[in-house]
Image (tube, rainbow, N blue to C red):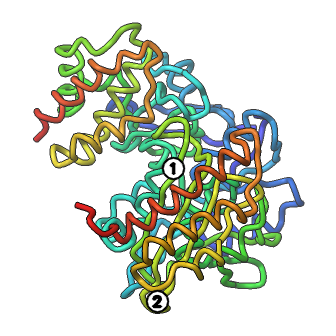
Amino acid sequence: MAAVEIVTPMTSDDAVATLQASAPGEAVVLAGGTDLLFDLEEGRTAPRRVISLRRLPWRTLDWNGPTLTIGSTLPLRTVENDSDVRARIPGLYEAVRAVGSVALRHQATMGGNLGRCAPASDLVPMLLALDAEVDLVGPAGERRLTVDQFVIGSRSTALQRGELIRSVRIPEARPSAYVWQRVRPFHDISHMAVAVAFSPSRSRWRVAISGFPPRPILAPATEDALHGPVPDESALGHAAEALARHAPIVADKRASEEYRRQLVRPLLIRAVHSVVPPPGAP
Amino acid sequence: MTTPATRLTVNGRPAVLGDVPTGERLLDTLRWRLGLKGTKEGCRTGGCGACTVLVDGQSALSCLLLTHEVDQASVTTIEGIADDPVGARVRAAFDSAGALQCGYCTPGFVMALTGLLRERGRSIPLEELLEDLGGNLCRCTGYATIVRAAQLAREGAP
């Protein structure tokens, strides 16, 4: 990594001003650094300035009734260790545990995962299924986008120049699950993953799939096919078949399209069964 | 380009480091600046756990931390593990289980297990403890004795 300047702003305003004062490509934003440091080491990005967010007061986790707000620089391990997250949003707990290792999660952050926006992100699909929103701060003030609006593709988001992710807002705790397939069970990248959540307020399932480019996506046709809080087994089977056939799944260097289509069917069934155990299950 | 001196506490002793390049990793600072070669470089991409140390008591990957980012922190490496009561117990468990072959992964495993037991104590279910060691790789595949060491260390946890 070439010589760079590290700037460590203490306030949100300072962070935004520093970022805005930097020419495009001149500065990168550092949260946990677990992904960014690869790029710096490999020379894929060669900024003159690194803006470290570590001193900003954004390492927060707040419950307000059913709503959970997670500060963008809070280490993921702290999210995982929150007993209410595990009990009330099990899918989020599972998705966070799918990211890297314990030591990595002591460093990695939700803001970083969203900002880097990998096609195989384990957090983005779960946040989609939870209808999560992203609160941004920037030169023009604050704005809120849904995760679906925020995510564009690998390393590509709706962030505008000078904007930072301040927090992620999950409007409603939901029964939920996150399941994946990969080479190694722990500390690996998912070839294919399914996130499901049941919204009590809308009495509707949300389903997202992940693992292939360009980005994790919602599967509205599958959501429509899962009627009510307890989908019947044949509706679930048909929804899984249709998802495997029609989802815009593609191949990349990690897995073929055919393999992924084979995987998504049992993953969806397993995810829904994790939320609503099938008849006769122990 | 450099910034003002970086101040760390390493294994209980203050370390004031001048002229640390901004891009320097904690791993390299420990090994080459402080001579603490017990912390190993494996993949250098956060995938193997060989470089695990404790930063403010929590496991961290020293290959993915800029030294400047841990200014003012307390760092524990394998060389300081005996001074930590949990670490001393983990070391004894590795000893009685004979949990090493070539030994290259051992410091990382000892640090990761120490971090987990400090964080969760005996209440961590064994299955979860073993899952949580999944970020550390042993290329000799000597996992059976490492699992045994983890069981022993957990049983002795307060």
The residue to which callout 1 is attached is A99
Q: Quadrant of the N terminus of chain A?
A: top right
- Which badge, 1 or 2, is on the more N-terminal residue? 1
Is any atom of residue A119 visible in this view?
Answer: yes
Q: Mark 2: which amino acid?
A: Ser
Q: Nearer the viewer, residue A279 or B60?
A: A279
Q: Residue at x 51, y 75 (%)?
A: A235
Q: Seen in the image, is A5 located left or right of residue A146? A: right
Crowd band around label 2 with a 10 angstrom C-alpha radius: few (<14), some (14–19), many (20+): few
Badge 1 marks a residue whose secondary structure is: loop
The mark closer to the camera, 1 or 2, is 2
Residue nearer the viewer, A189 or B83? A189
Q: State the image quarter where residue B137 is shown.
A: top left
Depicted A12 relative to depicted B135: above or below: below
Quarter containing the C terminus of chain A: bottom left
> Vertically, is A110 above or below B58?
below
Q: Kindly indicate the quadrant of the structure image that contains residue B78.
A: top left
> Which residue ends up furthest to the right in the rendered image?
A23
| Residue B90: image tag | none
For residue A203, which numbered disc appears in the image? 2
Give the amino acid at mark 1.
Val
Q: Chain of mark 1?
A: A
Q: What x and y, as percent, mark residue B83? A: 23, 27
Q: Position of residue B12 (x, y in %)?
A: 32, 32
Looking at the picture, does residue A251 appear above or below residue A72?
Answer: above
Whole-percent x, y for residue A167 in the image:
56, 73
Residue A54 visible in the snapshot: no
